[in-house]
Image (cartoon, grey):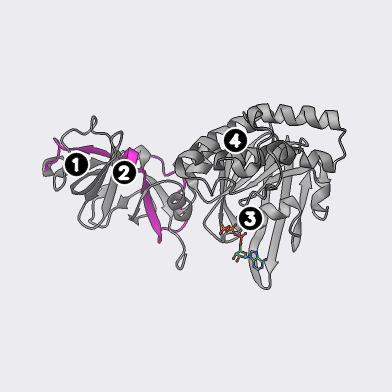
Amino acid sequence: MTHLTLQAVTRRFSDAYAVDHVDLSVPDGKLVCFLGPSGCGKTTLLRMIAGLETPTSGSIDFAGRDITHLPANQRDFGMVFQSLALFPHMTVAGNIAYPLRLRKLDKAAQTRRVNELLELIQLPHMANRPVTQLSGGQRQRVAIARAIASSPKLLLLDEPLSALDAKLREAMQVEIRLLQQRLGLTTIMVTHDQREAMTMADEIVVMEKGRIAQVGKPLDIYRDPVNEFVADFIGLGNILPVTYDGQGGVSLPGGQQIVVTQPARVPESTADIRLLIRPEDVCVSVAAASKDNAGPNRLIGKVTFIRDVGASLEATIDCSGFTLTAATTPRETPGLALGMPVLAELPPHACKLIAARAAGH
Ligand code: ATP
């Protein structure tokens, strides 16, 4: 069931479009991430869903009702923003109880609900501690507990983890995701971190300049991006300029032929085409690095940089005219060293043709 539907939602500030004709359906119980670079309109879109900003045009429906102009405090949505805005003079329990007090829930019901939430966020022993004496991650959990205290129909999160260090941030991503799944709570989260979106989302909405560039499941977007902007934004990728004859014939800047099994999205124009291949799909071989082995999809190059982080290894390969990044492991590619000639194979099924980013982007 679709819970939230946006139709041609637009927000203009003077004559600049922060959000430009966005159509979107958010299914019940799912976690959807708005992902995109700074200034692409993620926060403005979330604020319109929250009721904190009014669309210039378009409509927002929630559970079958037009809420476009409904005041924020009548929407029954929970919100957590970047600046958590916990009340510093209150305890953990006091913060969580705040929305319940506003709703004039009786004292016993408030205590029951606060205890339930403290269990849920695994801080039952900290009920009476001032929030100023909590770690960043604990504060984050309290903010989420407060946002969901009055059982909102929709949870809106705007970069809720951006103030945390990398390790804690990753732990909290898993925690929020598990909590959201357990509660079956429809959630929209804004982030500019593609790894975070990949970790947490059922669906990712990639935004560019106020518009939706692509919507889909994380791996579908990773594997089958609609264009160079999305391919570049989601994960590491080799994006190579190629010449395309319109009938499947693809050649690299050095003239090497590339066979593409199933160009998932053959762009209409043959003028500005890129070849996308993800680093983990590039197969590197030291032993086979002989000119005799070169051919379609088989390139000879030289290793110019190695990033070895123990569990994985990333090699930059100069193929005369362009560079490739290959992800491998020391076990898969033993003996790989700087300056070494290698054979890089680009399996036809892993090569995608995509439309180049428009000039000026
Ligand atoms: P970030 O990741 O940096 O927070 P964002 O994707 O959330 O960016 P928004 O904050 O939605 O982007 O801003 C989208 C565009 O709208 C930007 O160009 C911004 O400058 C502009 N904008 C946002 N709010 C206002 C405002 N109140 N008045 C004028 N322009 C605004």
Q: Which residue is mark 2?
A: 259
Q: Which residue is mark 4?
A: 176
Q: The N terminus appears in which quarter of the rendering?
A: top right
Q: Percent x, y for residue 86?
A: 68, 47
Q: Which residue is mark 3?
A: 43
**Residue type (three-letter) at the residue carrying disc 2:** Val
Give the image quarter of residue 313: top left
Q: Are marks 2 and 1 in contact (CB under 8 Å)?
A: no
Q: How many marks?
A: 4
Q: Residue at x 68, y 38 (%)?
A: 92
Q: Is mark 2 within 8 Å of ligand 1?
A: no
Point out the tag, 4 or 2, that comes first from the N-terminus: 4
**Residue type (three-letter) at the residue carrying disc 3:** Thr
Q: Is mark 4 within 8 Å of ligand 1?
A: no
Point out the tag, 1 or 3, that comes first from the N-terminus: 3
Q: Is mark 3 within 8 Å of ligand 1?
A: yes
Q: Judge depth for marks 1 and 3 and give the one in front.
A: 3
Q: Are marks 3 and 4 in contact (CB under 8 Å)?
A: no
The Cα atoms of the two marked residues, 3 and 4, are separated by 19 Å
